[in-house]
Image (cartoon, rainbow, N blue to C red):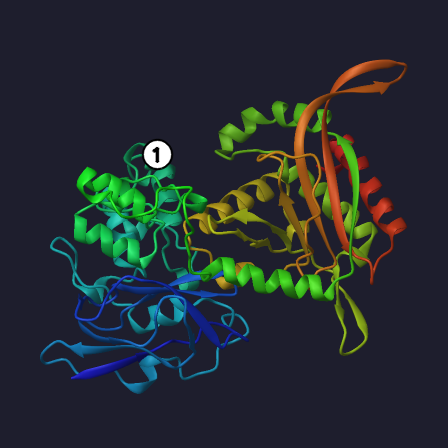
Amino acid sequence: MIYEFKLPDIGEGLTEGEVTRWHVKEGDPVAENQPLCHVLTDKAEVEIPSPKAGRIVKLFAKTGEKVKVHAPLVSLELEAGKSPAPAKAAAPAAKPSAKSAAQPAAQAAAKIAAKPAPGPAEQPAAAVKVLATPRVRQLAKSLGVELSQARGSGPEGRLLEADVRAAASRGNGPSAASQGAGPAVKSSPANATPAVRRLAAQLGVELSGLSGSGPGGRIAEWDVRKAAGPAFISGPERPGQGEERLPFIGIRRKIAERMRRSVDTVAHVTHMDECDMTEVLALRQSLRPEAERRKIKLTFLPFVLRALIAALKQFPHFNASLDEEAGALVVKRFYNIGVAVNAGQGLVVPNIKGADGKDLWGLAAETQELAARVRSRTIDVASLQGGTFTITNIGPIGGLFATPIVNHPEVAILGLMRMQKRPVWRDGGLFARDMMNLVLSFDHRIVDGADAASFMNTLIKHLENPRTIL
């Protein structure tokens, strides 16, 4: 029997997704719940598992192509004796509720394939109530984590890789740091084009062990041939010669679309000032024993978040969006603060929901968790939607000044630059202080330069007296 699997509903307002990676090819056998591909939607990459066991007959999209929701994704030749799933299983029949509408494709696909195949030592599938992909189950096994003891942070309690590692670090299994992902689990796919992957397969080269010489560490043909041996080096261009044409797809293309829209819409202006972070660093140092007890990595970012929220409450027009069709400024009385995270191919901006209701420890824990989920590509669409203001931390990389682009439709974005000791004249003397430049890009259609200067002064006042924001 041939079963046509269609792309499930991937969230409220989202009508299509871009296939960024295929994990299978035509002719491959697949198990139920085995990952088929990754789909990008609104900068979130979500894994689509197979709803049935069988053999791949046809892939309806190439890497980089967009697929409409409810359009065919793959066709499967089902195992002997199996019948196609009812039509309603191919895509959710009911309209998503407000609570679940923004959840990612992984949830919709998980409803199709929630029953995992039993392993040799597992209980029958009917007795297993844990939602997790085979990859996550394999990771849990390698770390000695009992799935029933882990708390799932994915849609409908679905277990993610980050949840398994968190369970291991809490003592429900061996240390995730010491065990790693196990020999059978790859931390991330190799950064290489399909053509380079085919060449590596032909020459018997394992991509996971290579360092790429291409842009962003991408593995080039030269790297594969060099690893295969001198006999295979003749012909291709060495790094630095000729040119390389790379597919402009996935997160990078999505960022380009959003940045172009922002530049075309927002009247960008950037205001810069400097802030004395000496007291923040001293306070953070005094809180380190408590941070270690809580097993939380305490950076200076939670202090910035607390100071930022205080400034936003005093200057609410910076926590707003412009409804141009209605001719109205929509001032938000909630604070979903986005924090830009480097996802390898570009910046992804998950946001902390209700950040004003979280203390220093809650902000520290959530920023750490969101960053981990972005880097492990397990972030859900809901975490990327509904932001009201964005922070981008450029400092760890370096630089004195930048002009960040506003994350439209937000009004402003705050950039944190490099922190370093600088001589400061104060109280009649010269002192070495920990100084950091702050840059605020804003939409001049909505707020003026004087507003930006006052907003920045308030932010700096709280950072230079951090006990006022605890």
Compared to residue 219, the image places residue 303 above or below, namely above
Residue 243 location in percent, x, y? 43, 51
**In this rendering, does residue 143 appear at all?**
no
At x 41% / y 66%, what residue is drawn? 64
Asked whether 317 or 364 is in front, the reply is: 317
At x 33% / y 50%, what residue is drawn? 189
Residue 51 location in percent, x, y? 27, 72
Image check: 204 left or right of 440?
A: left
- Numbered label tally: 1
Instruction: Quarter of the image for the C terminus: give it.
Output: top right
Residue sticking out furthest to the bottom: 87
Residue 310 location in percent, x, y? 77, 46
| Amino acid under disc 1 | Ala
Compared to residue 239, the image places residue 18 above or below, namely below
Compared to residue 176, the image places residue 153 above or below, namely below
Residue sticking out furthest to the top: 429
Residue 321 location in percent, x, y? 74, 65
Image check: 406 left or right of 69?
A: right
Q: Quadrant of residue 98?
A: bottom right
Q: Quadrant of residue 255?
A: bottom right
The residue under label 1 is 177
Compared to residue 338, the image places residue 428 above or below, namely above
At x 17% / y 58%, what residue is drawn? 123
Q: Is label 1 in a helix, a strand or a loop?
A: helix
Neighbour tally class for label 1: few under 14, some 14-19, many 20 plus, Cα within 10 Å: few
Q: Quadrant of residue 299?
A: top right
At x 50% / y 46%, what residue is drawn? 371
**In this rendering, does residue 44 appear at all?**
yes
Asked whether 243 or 106 is in front, the reply is: 243
Instruction: Quarter of the image for the N terminus: give it.
Output: bottom left
